[in-house]
């Protein structure tokens, strides 16, 4: 008999999933029932936690984990009606996951960076990696800049951080710390964490100094920094462990530490999305069902427990500093901010894939808290424009587009306004940094 959790799913998908689980129908060319390849950031802890919970829910039986005989790989084992089910999670870096998906050796590609243009083009004949059918934002992570707990330095700018890792600043005394040479720690070239750091911090201006010690593991990098008073490195937020986290500033925006609000809203300069990619029409029933679980409220609760930032919205009252205009403080005086920003496809007012899914999450939040549309306020922002009038128009249009999209979810006539190109959250990473300013914040009335 099918477990009750499967019975709640659509009939066609339920039968296909059941057949692939029980009868082992060959849907891809590998020995396991499902394989996830790619990012160590995702594969070290998050993917196994998500898959374990999914298998327990789907099969109703215990899931065991054992090594695969290879470093950073593990097998998750369970059974459905006496038939064994095997899932492999291989965590060797984001680029390895893309190669495995392209070679038909993986069902799911875990990536701690978005797919590159070359990767999208290469798989175009099989799947559109930019579509909602293939691109799944499973969590938000903050790239944490780590130092030894005794280090007195508390914050750095993006540009200063670039100079440090390029070897242009070599002593902590130059940063207000002790007279001590700086030791650099960095992820390896196969890592999406490295790709993100390279893009957002080094860019085309800086090159990583040859003295940097390279790591495949986030956790090991953080552990080594926590033992080295001269060390500085970067890792995923879930791997802070015993190291100290620095606040990071971007351009004229205030320095921020990664936390629930700054990372979930992607205001933190080194916030990043964590992805799972599937091959569109070729996605197996089991992989599709797994992603549905991951993106739902139960999967996102597991994301939170893993140390990453969930996409389930919560209301937070932000602490304003002197940089926040008095007009904005008055506007939001009776509101708290939801930990979600609506963002747009490049240069457009069209909501991106994550934002499309966030519409339902906001609707679910209102229902769970017994709130109505009148309790929401949308505030749109524009990136830097040639004049204030154009910026105001763009910010209002973006807020209006979210208002219309929420109406399709049954949330009608939400209050909205625009705040122009004021209160920028960043400029880092070239166009990508500037695009972070084009956003719509969601505020909820205090009761």
Image (cartoon, rainbow, N blue to C red):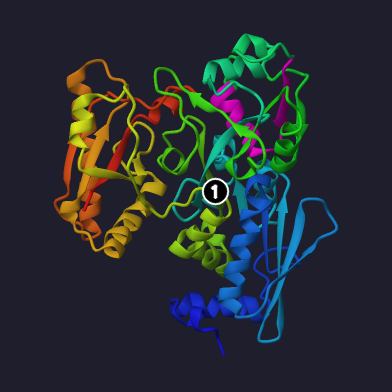
Q: Is residue 195 left or right of residue 409?
A: right
Foreground residue, 97 or 339?
339
Residue at the (41%, 34%) spot, across then down: 267
Which residue is outermost to the bottom?
1
Mark count: 1
Q: Which quarter shows the N terminus?
A: bottom right
Residue 264 point in image, percent of width and height: 43, 43
Up the image or down, 431 lies above or below 12; here it is above
Residue 204 point in image, percent of width and height: 58, 17
Q: Is residue 74 left or right of residue 418?
A: right
171 inside magenta stretch? no
Q: Is residue 21 left or right of residue 388?
A: right
185 inside magenta stretch? yes
Residue at the (69%, 13%) spot, across then down: 167
- Residues in magenta, as a range: 181-201
Q: Is residue 250 left or right of residue 62?
A: left
Residue at the (44%, 79%) spot, across then down: 8
Foreground residue, 63 or 180?
180
Q: Which residue is mark 1?
A: 308
Residue 126 point in image, percent of width and height: 56, 52
For label 1, the SS is loop
Up the image or down, 317 lies above or below 393; here it is below
- Answer whether residue 77 is visible to the viewer in this image: yes
Residue 363 point in image, percent of width and height: 29, 59
Quarter of the image where one finds residue 122: top right
- Answer whether residue 125 is visible to the viewer in this image: no
């Amino acid at each position: 008999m099918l477990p009750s959790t499967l019975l709640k799913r659509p009939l066609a998908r339920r039968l296909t999933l059941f057949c692939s689980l029980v009868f082992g129908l060959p849907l891809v060319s590998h020995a396991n029932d499902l394989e996830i390849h790619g990012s160590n950031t995702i594969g070290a802890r998050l993917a196994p936690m998500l898959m374990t919970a999914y298998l327990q829910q789907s099969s109703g039986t215990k899931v065991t984990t054992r090594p695969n005989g290879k470093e950073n790989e593990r097998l998750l084992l369970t059974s459905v009606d006496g038939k064994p089910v095997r899932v492999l999670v291989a965590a060797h870096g984001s680029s390895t996951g893309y190669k495995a998906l392209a070679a038909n050796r993986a069902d799911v590609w875990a990536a701690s960076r978005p797919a590159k243009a070359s990767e999208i083009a290469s798989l175009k004949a099989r799947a559109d990696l930019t579509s909602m059918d293939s691109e799944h934002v499973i969590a938000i992570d903050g790239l944490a800049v780590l130092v030894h707990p005794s280090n007195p330095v508390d914050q750095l700018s993006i540009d200063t951080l670039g100079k440090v890792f390029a070897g242009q600043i070599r002593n902590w005394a130059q940063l207000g710390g002790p007279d001590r040479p700086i030791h650099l720690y960095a992820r390896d070239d196969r890592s999406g964490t490295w790709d993100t750091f390279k893009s957002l911090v080094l860019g085309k201006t800086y090159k990583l100094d040859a003295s940097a010690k390279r790591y495949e593991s986030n956790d090991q990098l953080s552990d080594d920094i926590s033992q080295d008073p001269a060390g500085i490195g970067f890792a995923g937020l879930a791997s802070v462990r015993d190291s100290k986290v620095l606040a990071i500033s971007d351009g004229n925006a205030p320095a921020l530490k990664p936390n629930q609000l700054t990372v979930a809203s992607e205001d933190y300069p080194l916030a990043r999305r964590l992805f799972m990619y599937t091959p569109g029409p070729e996605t197996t029933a089991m992989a599709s069902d797994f992603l549905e679980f991951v993106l739902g409220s139960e999967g996102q609760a597991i994301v939170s427990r893993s140390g990453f930032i969930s996409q389930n919205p919560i209301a937070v009252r932000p602490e304003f500093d002197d940089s926040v205009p008095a007009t904005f403080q008055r506007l939001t005086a009776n509101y708290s901010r939801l930990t979600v920003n609506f963002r747009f496809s490049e240069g457009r007012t069209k909501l991106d894939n994550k934002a499309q899914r966030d519409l339902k999450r906001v609707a679910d939040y209102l229902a769970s808290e017994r709130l109505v549309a009148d309790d929401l306020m949308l505030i749109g922002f524009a990136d830097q424009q040639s004049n204030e009038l154009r910026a105001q128009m763009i910010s209002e249009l973006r807020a209006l587009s979210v208002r219309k999209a929420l109406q399709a979810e049954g949330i009608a006539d939400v209050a909205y306004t625009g705040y122009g190109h004021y209160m920028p959250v960043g400029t880092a990473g070239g166009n990508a940094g500037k695009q972070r300013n084009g956003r719509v914040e969601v505020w909820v009335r205090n009761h």
